[in-house]
Image (cartoon, rainbow, N blue to C red):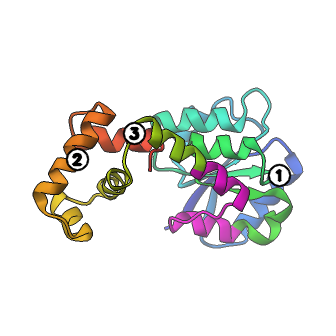
Amino acid sequence: MLTKITIYEDNETLRKGLEELLTLSDEFVVTGSYGNCMQVLEQLKEENPDIILMDIDMPGMTGIEAVKKIRQVNTGVAIIMLTVFDDNKNVFDAICAGASGYLLKKNVSEKLISSVKDVLSGGASMSPAIAKMVISSMQRQAADYRLSAREHEILTLLCKGNSYKMIASELNLSFETIRSYIKKIYEKLQVNSATEAVSKAINERLI
């Protein structure tokens, strides 16, 4: 099955170049290609792409604003940001808004296909500067809820779909100890269930 890709890039020359690069491969199909993202939600619903290539600096609505809108209705589609610089706050904001990764425009011709494949396989490379900003942000947010290192570790395992029993086995702790830790996590996050805890951890990027 072909991987469906939608492109948002206001530079027409670059946009056409992206289309051509992708159509050279028999693995991808470009479902839409746009110079702005003003109708992004309607286009997302209509095309249901697997991956979105999104320019950060777009007219009318920025790529970051578009990512926020997309994530309100769709958490599954992968979003690769297209950017000129790889160490600025816009890239960080895009990642925090829900982008899956980013690609430098100067590297598009050599790295587009590999970047798309990386994101499809669950990976996403980022520069040391951006990685440091993301990690620092997560640590600050986790600190806001006063989660201990062990509680953060257990919450992370919970978000990966592990059962209490699996977490206990992974950490070599008793089932009751894990249940006690998770009860404390619920209290600190002010939630009442594993589903709520996972949702809050993901939405507020606590893990």
Is residue 48 in view from this perspective?
Answer: yes
Residue under the point 31% across and 35% down = 188
The CA span between labels 3 and 1 is 34 Å
> Mark 2 or mark 3, which has the lower sequence index?
3
Where residue 75 sits in the image (x, y, percent)? 46, 45
Where residue 165 sits in the image (x, y, percent)? 15, 63
SS assignment at label 2: helix
How many numbered marks does the figure carry?
3
Snapshot quadrant of residue 153? bottom left
Of tags 3 and 1, which is closer to the observer? 3
The residue indicated by pointer 1 is 85
Magenta part mainly helix, strand or loop? helix
The one of 4 and 198 positioned closer to us in this rendering: 198
> Mark 2 or mark 1, which has the lower sequence index?
1
Residue under the point 51% across and 50% down = 77
Q: Amino acid at mark 2?
A: Ile
Snapshot quadrant of residue 9? top right
Mark 3 crowd level (few <14, some 14–19, many ≥20, 10 Å Cα): some
User: Does the stretch in magenta take in 93?
Assistant: no
Where residue 20 sits in the image (x, y, percent)? 78, 63
The one of 11 and 63 positioned closer to us in this rendering: 63
The residue indicated by pointer 3 is 146
The stretch in magenta equals 113-135
The residue indicated by pointer 2 is 182
Residue under the point 82% across and 57% down = 105
In the displayed structure image, the side of residue 42 where residue 188 appears, left or right: left
Q: Amino acid at mark 1?
A: Phe
Q: Amino acid at mark 3?
A: Arg
Q: Furthest residue to the top?
A: 60
The CA span between labels 2 and 1 is 41 Å
Q: Are marks 3 and 1 in contact (CB under 8 Å)?
A: no
User: Does the stretch in magenta take in 114?
Assistant: yes
